């Protein structure tokens, strides 16, 4: 991703650095079917219906369509992306609440990766992405069972570019969502076709940005470490 497209803090941030290096370390782990790496993201989609049917292309004449349209509300897309397994799954929902997130976590460990010991899970730090949501939606035993099969890692604030699922969303947007989407049923059909083709072709993301790269290219984000003498001077003196 070009650097100018990154969204990074304007100043030094130990919190950003911590979450960034945590995610980058996860991306360097070798493939292990017991601990599949899964990236997760979500995005809203505007539902739009044409008010007039387009005129199909003919010899010597391109397709013609009217710019008038009618808004049909919005939908939400969740995406699961396992880059080392060349696999992704798109889920269409009406909204993106804590309950929707909790249901996604249940489907992840129960349906998509039931044999995994634990899913290594990368997502952004939205307020709906909270383990406590599982206890709000499910019985305690089920909530605990789901959490025990998740190893959660959060991208930092201003660091959504660190989530490989966001790259998949970019591809989805260009290849599948660039036309009118009138309703959730049509959206589900289109994303399923896209998902199936991408999985069949074993498409993935070749992530190359490492912690070593970050410490050079994003050096300005790292807090300045004082020498030992200066640190001692700042420490409280015991009587």
Image (cartoon, rainbow, N blue to C red):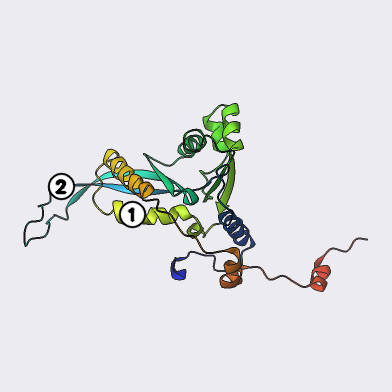
Is 18 left, or right, of 123 in this rendering? Answer: right
Residue at the extreme right: 239
Disc 2 is placed on an element classified as: loop
Disc 1 is placed on an element classified as: helix
Q: Quadrant of the C terminus?
A: bottom right
Label 1, residues with CA under 10 Å away: few <14, some 14-19, many ≥20 = some
Q: Which residue is mark 1?
A: 173
Q: Which residue is mark 2?
A: 51
| Residue 26, x across and y down, in percent | 58, 54
Label 2, residues with CA under 10 Å away: few <14, some 14-19, many ≥20 = few
Q: How many marks?
A: 2
Residue pictured at 54% horizontal, 45% vertical: 36
| Residue 21, x across and y down, in percent | 61, 59
Q: Quadrant of the N terminus?
A: bottom left
Residue pictured at 43% horizontal, 42% vertical: 96
Observer-nearest of 115 and 166: 115
Vertical position of residue 138 compared to residue 26: above or below? above
């Amino acid at each position: 991703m070009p650097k100018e497209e990154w969204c990074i803090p304007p100043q030094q941030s130990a919190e950003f650095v911590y979450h960034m290096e945590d995610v980058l370390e996860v991306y360097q782990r070798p493939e292990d079917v017991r601990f599949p790496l899964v990236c997760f993201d979500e995005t809203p989609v505007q539902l739009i219906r044409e008010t007039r049917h387009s005129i199909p292309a003919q010899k010597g004449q391109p397709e013609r369509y009217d710019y008038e349209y009618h808004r049909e509300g919005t939908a939400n897309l969740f995406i699961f992306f396992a880059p080392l397994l060349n696999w992704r799954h798109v889920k269409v929902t009406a909204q993106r609440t804590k309950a929707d997130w909790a249901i996604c976590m249940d489907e992840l460990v129960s349906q998509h990766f039931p044999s995994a010991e634990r899913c290594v899970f990368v997502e952004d730090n939205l307020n709906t992405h909270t383990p406590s949501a599982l206890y709000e939606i499910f019985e305690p035993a089920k909530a605990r069972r789901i959490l025990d099969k998740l190893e959660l890692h959060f991208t930092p604030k201003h660091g959504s570019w660190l989530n490989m699922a966001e790259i998949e969303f970019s591809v989805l947007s260009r290849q599948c969502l660039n036309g009118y989407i009138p309703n959730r049923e049509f959206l589900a059909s289109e994303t399923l076709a896209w998902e199936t083709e991408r999985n069949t072709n074993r498409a993935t993301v070749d992530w190359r940005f490492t912690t070593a790269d970050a410490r050079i290219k994003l050096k300005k984000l790292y807090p300045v470490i004082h020498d030992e003498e200066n640190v001692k001077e700042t420490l409280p003196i015991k009587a």
